[in-house]
Amino acid sequence: MAISEEQVRHVALLARLALTDEEVARFGDDLNSILSHIDTIQQLDLADVPPTAHALDVVNETRADEVKPCFTRDEALANAPEAAEGAFVIPRIVGGGEEG
């Protein structure tokens, strides 16, 4: 199955691409090559091959959920540029202007 120049231009239009005549010819060749590979794959007998999402089994490796020591509040705030009442002080990022 070969793709025509008109079909290349239609795909480019759908993708919102402005192609030159040279690009249309080059992409036409590329798309025809891709379609040729797909035709080759379609000729394979895959009746006994189960559908899969991955070529290899995928296993989630998770670590045990263990309680570990953490920073105290004072340790966490030790390097903060500014802290007050046991919390980080950060610049206001919402609003900040005159209301109205």
Image (cartoon, helix red, strand yellow):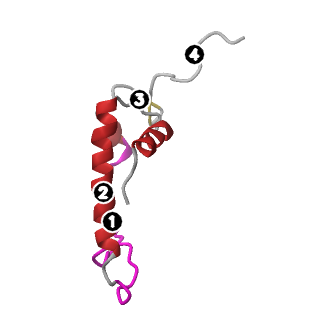
Q: Amino acid at mark 4?
A: Gly
Q: Quadrant of residue 41?
A: bottom left
Helix, strand or loop under label 4: loop
Q: Quadrant of residue 78?
A: top left
Helix, strand or loop under label 1: helix
Residue ID for mark 4:
96
The percent coordinates of residue 95 (x first, y second) are 59, 19
Q: Nearer the viewer, residue 19 or 87?
A: 19
Q: Indicate whether 70 appears above or below 89.
A: below
Residue ID for mark 1:
38
Residue ID for mark 2:
34
At horizontal 57% and vertical 16% (from top left) the residue drawn is 96
Mark 2 Cα within 10 Å, few/some/many (few <14, many 20+)?
few
Asked if one can make out residue 90 in the rendered structure from this viewpoint, the answer is yes
The percent coordinates of residue 81 (x first, y second) are 33, 25
Q: Amino acid at mark 1?
A: Ile
